[in-house]
Image (spheres, rainbow, N blue to C red):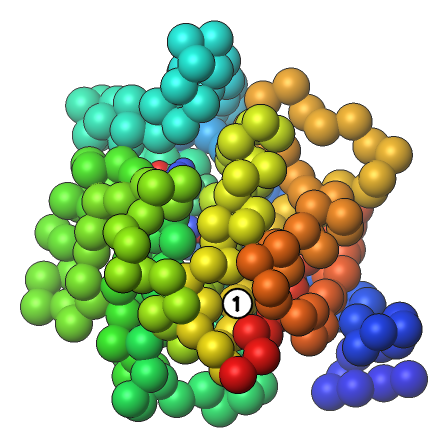
Amino acid sequence: MTLAGRNVRFRPANVMISVGRAGRRRGKGGEAARDRGNGRPALRWPAVAPAPGRRRAGRARQDQEATARLSAEALAAGDPTGWFERLYTEAERVDSTVPWDRESPHGLLVEWATARELSGAGRRALVVGCGYGRDAEYLGRLGFATTAFDISPTAVRVARERHPGSPVTYVTADLLDPPADWRRGFDLVLESMNVQALPPRVREAAFGAVGEPVAPGGTLLVIAAGREDEEDPPAAPPWPLTRGEIDAFGRSGLTPVRVEDLRDTGILRWRAEFHRPA
Ligand SMILES: C[S@@+](CC[C@H](N)C(=O)[O-])C[C@H]1O[C@@H](n2cnc3c(N)ncnc32)[C@H](O)[C@@H]1O
């Protein structure tokens, strides 16, 4: 059937699969190529990097190697999230930026919010792994009392600097060890492209942790790169999520509302919505 201009196939249990416009708009490398936060070159993020010119290709390759090296070193040292701060500080040092840096909010978030005419007035939102704050600022503009956190103090500092006067509260915090008073504290929790950057060992804990802050009656929105069950994960991050891993975000007692499979030009992305019963 067609819904809002999309081809939509329904699955049992209220779970929807769609092949849609959103997927088509973001072909391989499209996001990164389109919208770099401050015009600075990005350290390359596999699978979302632009097709650069020859000189930039060399730079991108080096940056990709640096990303893979930093994450591998952190993993080997038993500190699987340690490389984020190193990447952010490195970006500052060499006057570049991180691969996921965008000025505008994620298109799949905007599309989701717009379709619902989402208003945050009188409601609280939490943005997981906020990076430089693009999605947090968007939710703040929609009227949510927004808290946004990242494990990287440098990312949080730069987010504050980039958005002076912002109503968003930026906090350095660890998803796996969050402030106790966040539990069940937010009407909307956004997880966009973070858990895919965590290795499997940490990821298992992250699935439940992401949902814990969702208040009764509240919503969790997950946006992630996807891979098929039979596909091996790449050697270096990001490690796209399988459908089973997307379902695991419900572990903290959340009910799946809709899981969308948005794919085109060989790229699979998930947008999944969960609800905590009131
Ligand atoms: C791939 S980036 C995505 C950033 C942002 N969500 C966006 O879409 O622009 C992943 C982010 O998650 C953050 N992060 C990784 N592990 C984290 C953790 N345990 N707690 C909080 N943030 C974390 C990283 O520092 C990084 O900013």
* Picture quadrant of residue 163: bottom left
Position of 268 compared to 176: left or right? right
Give the quadrant of residue 174: top left
Quadrant where ligand 1 appears: top left
Residue 22, visible in the rendered structure = no
- Against 225, is 274 above or below? below
Indicate the amino acid at tag 1.
Leu
Q: Nearer the viewer, residue 247 or 224?
A: 247
Query: Does residue 76 sit above or below 139 in this rendering?
Result: above
Horizontal side of residue 209 vs 158, given as left or right: right
Q: Secondary structure at mark 1?
A: strand
State the residue at coordinates (77%, 50%).
243
Q: Nearer the viewer, residue 72 or 115?
A: 72
Looking at the image, residue 110 sits to the left or right of residue 163; the answer is right
Question: Mark 1 — residue?
Answer: 220
Residue 53 is situated, as x and y percent measured from the top left of the image, at 51, 30
203 or 111, which is in the foreground? 203
Q: Position of residue 77 (x, y in %)?
A: 41, 9
- Residue at the spot x=20%, y=38% of the render? 153
Mark 1 Cα within 10 Å, few/some/many (few <14, many 20+)? many
Quadrant location of the N terminus in the rendered image: bottom right
Relative to 127, 220 lies left or right: right
Q: Position of residue 239 (x, y in %)?
A: 62, 33
- Vertical order, 221 against 63 (above or below): below
Instruction: Tell me where residue 18 appears, x and y as whole percent.
Output: 80, 69
Question: Residue drawn at (49%, 91%), measured in percent from left and top?
Answer: 117
Residue in front for this viewpoint, 117 or 152: 152
Visible residue check, residue 8? yes
